[in-house]
Image (spheres, rainbow, N blue to C red):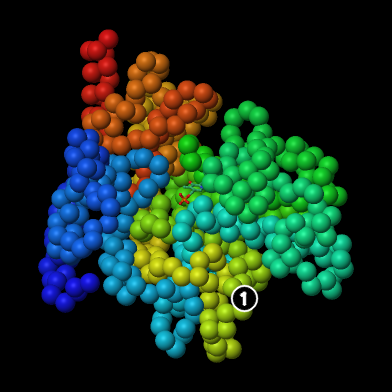
Amino acid sequence: MNMDNVNDNACLERIYALSADALSKRQMPVLPDVSALAFCRACLFESIPDHGIGVEETTNHLCLDVAPVLNASGLSPNYYGFVTGGITPAARVAESLVSLYDQTPQVHLPNETIASNVEDRALSLLLDLLNFDRRKWSGVFTTGATASNVVGLACGREFIINQRLKACMGPESQGSLGSLGLLKACRMAQIDEINIYTTMAHSSLYKASSIVGLGRSCVHDVRRSGSGFGFDLEDLERRMESGQHNSVSIVVVSCGEVNTGLFATYGRRDLLNLRSLCDKYGAWLHVDGAFGIFAKLLDSVAGFERVAQGAEGVDLADSITGDAHKLLNVPYDCGFFFCRHPDLAQQVFQNPNAAYLDTKTAPTDTIRSPLNIGIENSRRFRGLPVYATLVAYGRDGYRDMLHRQSRFARAVAAYLYEHDAFELLPKNVFKYRERIDQNIFIIVLFKAKDDGLNEQLVQRINASSKIYVSGTVWDGSPASRIAVANWQVEPHRDLEIVKGVVEEVIKTWAKGK
Ligand SMILES: *Cc1c(COP(=O)(O)O)cnc(C)c1O
């Protein structure tokens, strides 16, 4: 490998120039050209070259064949697919430091690096931002909300099974699920069923359930019939009660449903009801607040009381999932997991018998090595961009950002509501115009009234390449979904862009008929 005479600074300069160019564009195509995609796909190396082409040639390849055919999901304020977020300037700056130092914060080495202190502080600032009591909650960074749900179910599983083990084997028993394993622990605790009760759960909860050995089929939707995504508390209690001798359960609250942005609970009373059922039957209460947890930031903003209620009372849960690469606008991949039982994660994630990773710290130092309370043993220093962006913009900056995003989502919803050609979904929620200004958070779900147009709506909107929306299915029909998550949103400017695209789609559809 010849690494002597390459001018990698010049290569970096080219990449910086490319990013400066991309960042300076206020409006850019949200999708690359399809023919360019096909062309560039053919330019990718099919096999490893015997002799590498070197950094300069590789930089050419990246600048000419890769960068131009990436989409603008993180760069453009008009990309409304999924909930992607972008990267704030402060997070971008911090991210380059992450790459430069290439340092893993997984082992707490307070006399050698400040990395784990920074992550610990970043988690504390996040707790502050979301108004959680730092003394009661502790956290860990994950790769995203899916991983946080895995950690949440793993902790929940540990807790509920260990409780039963103690009840069966006596309080002195040393066994725990983490050491015994699921099969043996369940046999000793006389458990033959583990259930997860939820409403309108994100698909990743089913995945997480499979990963931790509970299975996708143990996730049950106990939604109340009628409008809204709330729990049917009677059904929930009946199920918990009927299985109380041989089963244990985890209750998961969808704090922000991904298709609609609506919430499973509204206000502290709803969480209190779930909490008391969980206490009565020894269940674990987990909240999936990937993006919804940020609604807490709007609790003092006039007009957003109902949305803020969607995240009210979540401090009554045992554990909480959040995404930082969505509404916090830091780079992929970054999620967080908060828990109210400080020693539990260690029972699950303890990396045992690795003396070389044991670090002696001062007795007053309470920081735990992240490798013993989370999934990875090595990973990137993903807490640094979180720390940087929170320090740079503060609580007010984030409140303002979310307020802009929400106002814009409401303006789009109102425009579609008034429009003859469209219908807001869920229909029973948006029966009245006032509901928009109560319920819309950052997602707008809608369909065209004309079935033919509706079939093609997402494709026709995205063909403009001025905005991007994602498709989904709602009540058996195709639906379109606008998710607002980028820090650069400007409600007035962006509303005009959306209107322009939508009017054009309507016009060409009418002409084609
Ligand atoms: C996005 C999302 C997830 C999954 O998040 P990833 O970051 O993709 O792992 C889980 N739950 C909810 C509610 C989400 O919105």
Image: 234 above or below 58: above
Drawn side of residue 407 relative to residue 336, left or right = left
Residue farthest along the top direction in this orientation: 513
Q: Position of residue 245 (x, y in %)?
A: 86, 50
> Could you tell me which quadrant the C terminus lies in?
top left
Residue situated in front as seen by the camera: 309 or 47: 47
Image: 391 above or below 411: below
Q: Dot 1 lies on which element? A: loop
Drawn side of residue 462 relative to residue 302, left or right = left
Q: Position of residue 258 (x, y in %)?
A: 48, 41
Residue situated in front as seen by the camera: 98 or 207: 207
Residue at x-position 34% and y-position 22% = 456
Residue situated in front as seen by the camera: 258 or 441: 258
CB of mark 1 near ligand 1 (< 8 Å): no
**What amino acid is at disc 1?**
Pro
> Could you tell me which quadrant the N terminus lies in?
bottom left
Q: Position of residue 222 (x, y in %)?
A: 68, 37
Q: Which residue is mark 1?
A: 352
Image: 468 above or below 364: above
Image: 216 above or below 336: above
Residue at x-position 30% and y-position 50% = 74
Drawn side of residue 189 relative to residue 85, left or right = right
